[in-house]
Amino acid sequence: MSYEVTWEPRGVIKRFSALVTDNEMIQSVVDTEKDARFDELRYVINDFLGITGISMTKDSVEEISVRDRGAAYTNPNIRIAVVATHPEIIALANAYANSPLNAYPTKIFPTLVEARSWLGQAKPHR
């Protein structure tokens, strides 16, 4: 698995590494949306800074958009921050953000600090 999910008090951060595939990206969405804590989420951070590459199509982006649209009936209060510098990830994130099926406000950032600032979330204290 090339991703790790960390739950925070009002959100979740998904850190991707190595080569990310369509199936892994879709599974990360399924894992988040089926979790009992999903209804309390206010943000999702998708951190792609640790990847080596991506094997994903725009069809998979559309599938994620459809899944998210359905999930938004349960929780419409989520904002999504994508942290990426890889050009292909940025292009796919833009495709998601601009999809007519997209249910959640989505922005792309080059750093986690900027993403958290937009979300109004400091790093949680442990």
Image: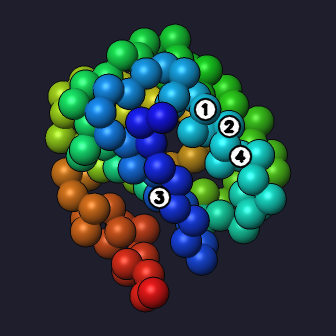
Q: Is residue 69 left or right of residue 20?
A: right
* Residue that extends furthest to the bottom in the rendered view of this protein: 125
Residue 108: image location, x then y, percent: 31, 46
Q: Which residue is mark 3?
A: 13
Q: Is residue 107 above or below residue 41?
A: above
Q: Which residue is mark 1?
A: 27
Label 3 sits on a secondary structure element that is strand
| Residue 30, numbered circle | 2
Residue in view at x 80 percent, y 59 percent = 36
Residue in view at x 69 percent, y 31 percent = 67
Q: Earlier in the sequence, mark 1 or mark 4?
A: 1
Q: CA distance from mark 1 to mark 4?
A: 10 Å
Q: Which residue is mark 4?
A: 33
Look at label 2 and name its amino acid: Val
Quarter of the image with the C terminus is: bottom left
Q: Count of labels shown?
A: 4
Look at label 3 and name its amino acid: Ile
